[in-house]
Amino acid sequence: MPTVSVKRDLLFRALGRTYTNEEFDELCFEFGLELDEITSEKEIISKEQGNEKAQGASDVVLYKIDVPANRYDLLCLEGLVRGLQVFKERIKSPVYKRVMPNGEIQKLIITEETAKIRPYAVAAVLRNIKFTKDRYDSFVELQEKLHQNICRKRALVAIGTHDLDTLSGPFTYTAKKPADIKFKPLNKSKEYTACELMNIYKTDNQLKHYLHIIENKPLYPVIYDSNGVVLSMPPIINGNHSKITVNTRNVFIECTGTDFTKAKIVLDTIVTMFSEYCENQFTVEAAEIVFPNGKLHTFPELTYRKEIVRADLINKKVGIRETPENLAKLLTRMCLKSEVIGDGHQIEIEVPPTRADIIHACDIIEDAAIAYGYNNIQMTLPKTYTIANQFPLNKFTELLRHDMAAAGFTEALTFALCSQEDIADKLGLDISATKAVHISNPKTAEFQVARTTLLPGLLKTIASNRKMPLPLKLFEISDVVIKDSSRDVGARNYRHLCAVYYNKNPGFEIIHGLLDRIMQLLAVPPGEKKGGYAIKASEGPAFFPGRCAEIFARGQSIGKLGVLHPDVITKFELTLPCSCLEINIELFL
């Protein structure tokens, strides 16, 4: 959950009254928030850097408030105050309007070169805005909170805000070679090329985290005005020429990105929060976007939409008995203007542009529950009587774990995700033959696929514990994931048992003896008749030739055991022989 820091006195002044810490904590809870910490800038610096560094820091009391991750409208003081005031019924939820300018509309022209880098852009103008130091700080902080939250650290959306009076439209959003982009970046005194800036910002504690987004691209995105002045090089830095100050009166806001929907949400959030300080409150001047195909779109959208939910559905889901009129009143307190319509059992809800988190009827029901008060919902006994039971497969797994430990093996718990190399290349297999489920956008190369075998995880565990006394005897009983087109999700979990013996000799007889012990515990007799088990000579790319056997139980193949091939051992950075056993245990339930 994002944490918003607000100055206590500034917050109370905006709310029109003061609260004790306990009272404000209770108000936050009623509104679905949490007062996480009461601190000050001096106290924070003192904790992090020591008392000496804290000398001269501000003693102003700060409230750190935890906000739900999808409530972008509460990420700044303005939205927080507005939400609380509407919740306490001191003000009505404002109506946000998009207006056309008296003169020529500001245009942002997108060229084809941006298509493969950051293809989308939206824009708007805050006209005749009045900043103070606190308002300006809040404006900057909201952008940073959005960048870290919905913008996914600028990877999806980057925000640029500019002093419109220093620029001349129309604006052009294009992409050029880094060497061809030269401008004076924010808070710098000289011009640099894009290449030079990337090198400079590699040591910048804030900006270095965003360089990878465009660093290896042949072209960098850039926005110019009609005189060739650079507004910004998204998502890295704005130009110093159009820098916003407390004295700025007209703000041009542009949001570029790879996600069009999130770009629109971000723009709507910024303009709705700070249009409060415009000469005409809650009005936003439109800007026109010209897409490469020639189509024109006007932003911000500031769309209001209607949803209809039955009152009895809200009552049923929350567990309350309220009239439709009361429910409509509760929802209105959550900035969702509502009224009873039709036969008197339906509620029409107007979702404002600030509430991008309202996607489904359940989101509306949740807001009704918050407004009603979770502590006010009566506790009732369920109408059904059930006796809880452990899931049979999990109970079976627990019993096996205890006996595996009794056999002298140590349990390991490894990651369910791994690299393609772990389950394919290192085991001598082709990745297409593994039927592995692939992660569409893996964060690291270590987590590319869901594991199809438990063996790599145990071998990596041994590699990390090579200095431990020999022998190393590890086991794991966990799920593997295999593609299965017959399932609605396209994959299926199987519960596997895997054991590994690592020593100066292969220890095949140890692993074989473990298999016999497992079968004895499961009351599966040796031999293929009468539902027994047997092993048959087999081959596998991961095993030493002539030292591999396939395990059959109750007429089905359930796994393999054997001595691992030296190539496999080497690829997992091991130096001694290793035997392993891996079986599917679901057959024995």
Image (spheres, grey):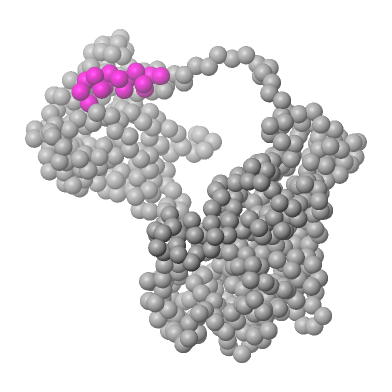
Toward the viewer: 375 or 285?
375
Report the number of discs: 0
Q: Position of residue 37 (x, y in %)?
A: 55, 48
Residue 310: x and y, percent?
80, 36
Of residue 304 and residue 367, the one placed in the foreground of this image is 367
Which residue is drawn at the image coordinates 14% and 31% (left, top)? 471
**Residue 112 shown left or right of residue 516 in the figure:** right
Q: Nearer the viewer, residue 357 or 39?
A: 39
Instruction: Report the residue at 83% width, 42% height from top.
Output: 329
Residue depicted at x 66% and y 50%: 357
396 over 176 or under it: above or below: above
Asked if 382 appears above or below 540 in the picture, the reply is above
Q: Position of residue 178 (x, y in %)?
A: 44, 80
Which contiguous range is marked in magenta? 395-409
Residue 454 visible (yes or no): yes
474 shown above or below 445: above
Q: Is 305 placed left or right of 227 in the picture? A: right
Residue at the farthest left position: 504
Asked whether residue 379 is drawn in magenta, I would say: no
Identify the residue at horizontal 67%, vertical 79% (top origin).
247
Q: Quadrant of the C terminus?
A: top left
Residue 416: quadrant of the picture = top left
Q: Is residue 289 left or right of residue 348?
A: left
Q: Is residue 407 magenta?
A: yes
Magenta segment, prevailing SS (helix, strand or loop): helix
Outermost residue toward the right in this view: 343
Q: Position of residue 66 (x, y in %)?
A: 58, 48
* Whether residue 146 is visible: no
